[in-house]
Amino acid sequence: MLRTLIHVDDPEHRDLRGVTAEWFLPKNLMKLEGMLADLAKRYVDKMAEMGNQCDFVRDIAMFMPLNVILSILGLPESDYPRMLKLTQELFGGLDEDLARDSDPAAIVQVIQDFFVYFTKLTQDRRAVPTDDMASVVANATIDGQPLTDMQTISYYVITATAGHDTTASAMAGGLLALMENPDQMERLKSDPSLMNTAVDEMIRWVAPVKHFMRTATEDYEVRGTTIKKGQSVLLSYPSGNRDEDAHPDPFRFDVGRSPNKHLSFGYGVHFCLGAALARMEMNSFFTELVPRISSIELAGAPDYVATTFVGGLKHLPIRYTLR
């Protein structure tokens, strides 16, 4: 029902990736540093304003990444709640609290709702282009031809959904990991220069994308097992991120882990286009939050989204004191 960057191979993948690649170059992402710092302060201040308790997922984590990617796309802020709900219905189709209804066919209606919304957006941006990413996608051409409706709308869907849900999961799971490993929280507090490695460790630890299915293009042997050309292969990212051969002591959460060759962003030509942006968002948020924490603890049991594909914590009730 979709034809996104994750569904296609080269040369179509390369051409589609090139449509927005410039937006994610370091020189352009650096322009977002001020906005990210402001958003981080806004949401940590919100935690303070809420008193000493919140559901970190529902009150904080899901909103900062949502604001970032949808503002880059150029969507009006009034539509953010709609995009959030559709994203949760798309990725949470197996979760009784998030799914539209119990009928598995409901996911078709969710995707149709995305198509209706983004078809209108495409028409608007083609009629009156602006300086946002939505206009770039709407007016893009490949070999002199405009993108098809399926390519355009799929581009919007993957950007608007994966562009925030995965980062929100990494933020919430990262905070839980710091809470469960107070020695690492104190280490990060005392040495803020570890923030870059800490963020990558959170992303390794959480692995918000659980798997992708791929098809072998040739016979290949892995540790004595032969995968035949044409066979389906499950890429399990949580497993890869805890491979003892790649990560010494992989079940230890280590904010200083280096090197950290985790696979949460994928590998090769399909490496996540927004990886640098996700890291920047998390860096900005935890750079604001961690120094302000005087105390923090669970205020209830963490609850996870029922998913086999993309997701993380659904609820993270916490009790805290902020400076």
Image (cartoon, rainbow, N blue to C red):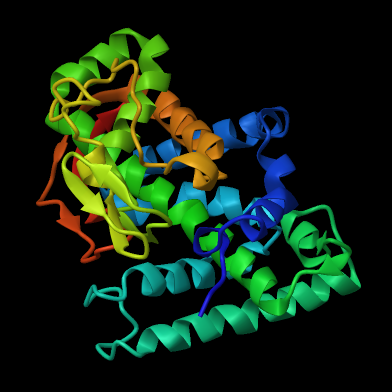
Tell me, yes or no, if residue 53 can be seen here: no
Q: Quadrant of residue 30?
A: top right
Q: Position of residue 10 (x, y in %)?
A: 61, 55
Please give the count of numbered marks on the rendered protein.
0
Q: Position of residue 163 (x, y in %)?
A: 52, 53
Q: Nearer the viewer, residue 65 or 123?
A: 123
Classify residue 252 by image quadrant: top left
Q: Is residue 220 above or below residue 246?
A: below
- Residue at 15%, 51% in the rendered image: 302
- Left or right: where does residue 29 sit relative to residue 180? right
Say if 157 sits above or below 201 in the image: below
Q: Is residue 107 left or right of residue 38?
A: left
Q: Residue at x 57, y 45 (%)?
A: 273
User: Measuring 52% from the left and 73% from the top, which residue is drawn there?
Assistant: 82
- Tell me if residue 89 comes above or below residue 141 in the rendering: below
Q: Is residue 221 above or below residue 146?
A: above
Residue 211 spot, x, y in % from top left: 31, 55
| Residue 223 relative to residue 191: left or right | left
In the rendered image, is residue 207 in sight? Answer: yes
Provide residue 162's location: percent of width, then percent of height: 47, 57
> Residue at point 31% right, 70% down?
92
Which of the two residues, 237 or 41, is positioned nearer the viewer here? 237
* Left or right for 251, reference 285: left
Instruction: Specify the quadrant that holds the C terminus.
Output: top left
